[in-house]
Image (spheres, rainbow, N blue to C red):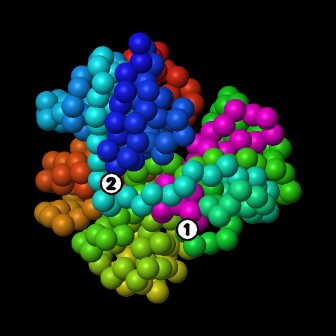
Amino acid sequence: MSHAVTIRGLDAEIAVEPGETILDAALRSGLPFPFGCQSGNCGACKCALVAGGVALAPYSEFALEEGERLQGMILGCRAMPVEDCTVALLETEELEAHPARELSCRVVALDDLTHDIRRLRLEILSGGPFAFSAGQFASLRFAGLPPRDYSMASRPDEALLEFHVRLVAGGAVTPHVRERLKIGDAVALAGPMGTSSWRRRHAGPILAVAGGSGLAPIKSIVETALAAGARQPIRLYVGARAERDLYLLDHFAALAARHPNLAVIPVLSAPDGPTARRTGFLADALAADLGALDGWKAYLAGPPLMVESCVDALARLGMARGDCHADAFYTEAEKQALMRAAGG
């Protein structure tokens, strides 16, 4: 027997079938329920259980801390109702709602940003207009291949959509983007999705932390905030293994020259030779540089280990989890492994 779940923040009621999660049922119903990894590891689908009961499949404490669970927080991707329920989305007053779109697009530009990251720009042919918040992502489908999620690197007000695609060795999709995708090819897009987006009403200092191709959503956030006239301090940390993994530094240096409130700090974790750049792990750099973080908000994107270690470092500095908007980039293989480990 299905259970009725009322979702505050979306003003909707859905039927959740036995063995189905609240997130699965919401997405099946076409609702813009926030989500990320769908395997209980990122926390993007965290919500409050207002009434009723659920069974929770195994999840990571990074996504849902014990104290949060005791306060009534649950993960939509791991929650299976055992009775009729009411859940409330978090921070709905700060998040902008955008209609879900299915777009037909065309590749209009391709270039290599690093040895393993390719930038593609898409022109929308039909299905628009496409509104999104800086920091969100979309699902892209190339030439009959399975869909993959990528963050928009462009600002919401730009005509072309920009994405940074990192090559995943042995992957089913990224080798196609790297080796076979060409100008004029069709790309299907669905979105927008994600809750790790810029909070435009926040007037305090901004901390932006990017690892690898996680620079894509961080680029969108930083550029959008500056274009909107943000005057508060913005500190951008860009992490990479070696020099060849850094990209767009000249772009951000030019941006910082025009906006004195922007500071850009590259950090190399495993330089392959002598370097004048800062070295070490991003989490250690944050811990060394930052003091009290009252009034700050942080936006983080990149590999899961980097994101988790940086969020932990910021928590030790006193930043509330609610002020950390983190997007951990899981590969499809990592997602599947997490699902198996969680019994999903």
Residue type indicated by callout 1:
Pro
Magenta segment includes 146? yes
The residue at which mark 2 appears reads as 92
In the image, residue 144 sits, relative to residue 83, either above or below, namely below
Q: Is residue 20 visible?
A: yes
Q: Nearer the viewer, residue 153 or 58?
A: 58
Magenta segment includes 324? no
Residue lying at 46% horizontally and 86% vertically, measured from the top left: 258
Which label sits in the foreground, 2 or 1? 2
Where residue 104 sits in the image (x, y, percent)?
76, 52
In the image, residue 228 sits, relative to residue 338, either above or below, namely below
Q: In the rendered structure, which segment of residues is drawn in magenta?
A: 131-154
Q: Nearer the viewer, residue 87 or 160?
A: 87
The residue at which mark 1 appears reads as 156
Where residue 225 sits in the image (x, y, percent)?
42, 73
Residue 240 marker = none
Quarter of the picture containing the N terminus is: top left
Q: What's the CA distance linking mark 2 and mark 1?
A: 20 Å
Where residue 191 sits in the image (x, y, percent)?
58, 49
Where residue 116 sits in the image (x, y, percent)?
65, 47
Left or right of 179 on screen, residue 86: left
Q: Nearer the viewer, residue 341 or 290?
A: 341
Instruction: Label 1: state its secondary structure.
Output: loop
Instruction: Label 2: state its secondary structure.
Output: loop
Q: Nearer the viewer, residue 52 or 238?
A: 52
Q: Earlier in the sequence, mark 2 or mark 1?
A: 2
Residue type indicated by callout 2:
Thr
Left or right of 210 on screen, residue 124: right
Left or right of 303 on screen, residue 163: right
* Quarter holding residue 77: top left
